[in-house]
Image (tube, grey):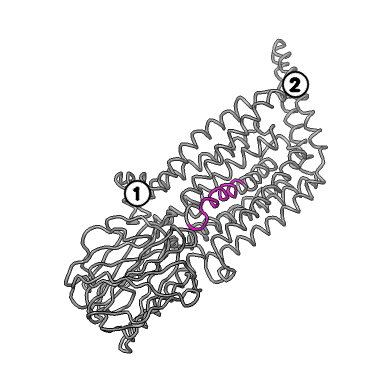
Amino acid sequence: MTQTIAPRVRTLVLLLLAACGLLLTTAGPASAHAALTGSDPQQGVVVDKAPDQVALTFSEKVALSNDSLRVLDPKGKAVQQGKPFEVGGTTYGVKVHSGLPDGTYTVTYQVVSADSHPVAGAYTFSVGAPSTTSVSVSGETAGGGVVGWLYGFGRYMSYAGFIVLVGGAAFVLGCWQRGAGVKPMQRLVVGGWLTLTSATLLLLLLRGSYTGSGKVGDVFDLDLLGNVLQTKAGAALVSRLLLLAAAALFISVLFGAYDKREDEEKRDLTFGLAIGGTVVAAGLAASWAMAEHASVGLQAGIAMPVDVVHLLAVATWLGGLTALLVALYRSDAPIESAAVRRFSQVAFGSVVALVATGVYQSWRQLGSWSAFTGTRYGQLLLVKIGLVALLVGIAFISRRWTAQLADTVVRQNKRAPQKERVAASASGSGKSKGAGSKRAAQLARQQAAMDTARQKRTRDADPHRFGLRRSVLAEAGVAVVLLAVTTVLTQTEPGRTEEDAKAAKTASSSSSSSDASGTSGALTLDMSFDTGGTDGKGVVTVDFDPARVGGNEMHVYVQRPNGRAFDIPEVKVALTLEAKKIGPLTVTPDRIATGHWSASNVQIPMAGDWKVAVTVRTSDIDQTTVSKNAQIG
């Protein structure tokens, strides 16, 4: 029966690896985790006067390089000057040459979001009138190509190595201490350590090219590597390598001194290894939490420890499952039913922790029920939830087999060492009796081998153990696919960010429409803001009517990123005509309704390119000022 199972196992593994490869290759470039929420000039707009600078607003903080923001004329020549700089909040700008001629200009950007993922894109605006341009904006992506595929593969292998290393060691230490002396179990845990270490080194080498040019030739650029080491993602990878050195010491003790101790002597060492191993495992998990999704956005201080618990629960469950699979299929030493039952209890606790932390992470990354079906992140999350539910269902079947598992085979195998000692004794006593005794010793060894094979057949014939093997194998298969989906999910823009970006684009389109209809005598300006505090993001809209010299009606609307009215403590507006050194003329509008302020008879003394600056205060200490230029009069 087991002879027919082995080919099936190999076939299933190959199919699962192919499925995972398909998921990773179809993931494409890493999705932007910092979304572009606004720009000045806006996308597609036609301005009468060439701007002095181009500014882009993102949904979160980003890291800039010298070529992060570029402005290209219709012939593809760069017209920006100097290095990109931070305007304020999450807005970044670059100066452009003065006196730009009429035509269509292309703005390209490539930055790194605060959660370590590259973000790239492009858009156009026109000065005077649109024109043809030789610049293509369709190919502006980040994290793609061969380097992007290798980086995604490295991420998958790092997660897999972490799960096998932590889960396998936890299984040996907490469920099956006899497994410390089992060679396949040792190879499994050491293999997890080698996989995680190799993948981390690969990610460190690829990081500079992955977030920059995307060229394979830049992988070994030492200057790029030096820049990577100064970033948050680089520091996290280096920290992971240092923790892996401590993990190597833990493994050497677990499979060395610990295995040689008697059962009574193992108690104190077990406690010490458990404490040390938990600290190292939590540190390894934190190397992801400190540099990715959990480190930015809403409630980062809570999200990072929750993410650590989530990763540890996944590793304990799926890594322990892998170790159990190895014990059932590869180990000559039988695993006791008591050890399987202990793992079943540990796995149940891990699933509870996984569900609790997963619910919080889902709420934090999605923000609304519509994001489940309306965003790619939400759709992938639904797939992940379905796989987890399937995995829990199969685990329930495994628990039923575990409850029926008998220890009869274990008792039979306990007699094996006695037979081996008899064979050894026969071999030893025969050394003094010449060739005949050598023949007897050889026969004794053959008999011992036959007894071992017979015991293994008897053990494998146990229907309960065979059923447990099949269910655990099915669990492992689903777990491999689940890990691939999770890897793609970590490279996908969170649903909350994607919906905020959609809302900002809608507001931008409305503003462009309003600006295009300027002949009606009204002017509308939209500006995204972020005060930096809790619930501090939104869009402020300023309306001037009739937007000409003399008295004007001014209305100010403040909305959340999802378009709902935003009731904040204070709004102030300042008007400045820098060319004539007029202003700032401060206007404090009156609150009319939730998210709506108004001021009448706002005097515009002369026509010109006025700077409209709006100060938004969302709490006693959180405020910011955003501005935009507009032709009034």
Tell me which amino acid carries mark 1.
Val
Percent position of residue 462, x then y? 80, 44
User: Disc 1 or 2, which lies upstream in sequence?
Assistant: 1
- Front residue of this view, candidates 374 and 396: 374
Answer with the quarter of the image where residue 432 lies: top right
Other residues around mark 1 within 10 Å, as few (<14) / some (14–19) / many (≥20) = many
Residue 87 relative to residue 302: left or right: left
- Does residue 78 appear in this view? no
Give the secondary structure at mark 2. Answer: helix
Residue 157 on the magenta segment: no
Quadrant of residue 239 within the rendered picture? top left
Q: Residue at the spot x=56%, y=29% of the render?
A: 252
The percent position of residue 123, horizontal first and vertical second, equals: 33, 71
Task: Say above or below: 318 vs 104.
Answer: above
For the stretch drawn in magenta, the main secondary structure is helix
Q: Residues within 10 Å of mark 2 (few under 14, many from 20)?
A: few
Which residue is depicted at the point 75% across and 21% down? 421
Q: Is residue 384 visible?
A: yes
Q: CA distance from mark 1 to mark 2?
A: 57 Å
The residue pinned by badge 2 equals 421
Q: Which residues are magenta?
A: 297-312
In the rendered view, would you say 125 is above or below 336?
below
Where is residue 522 drawn, in percent x and y? 34, 85
Q: 160 and 602: which one is in front? A: 602
The quadrant of the picture occupied by the C terminus is bottom left
> In what element is the residue under mark 1?
loop
Type of the residue with mark 2:
Arg
Q: Is residue 301 magenta?
A: yes
- In the rendered view, does 396 fall on the left or right side of 29? right
Q: Which residue is mark 1?
A: 219
* Closer to the camera in the image, 572 or 17: 572
Q: Is residue 310 above or below residue 240?
A: below
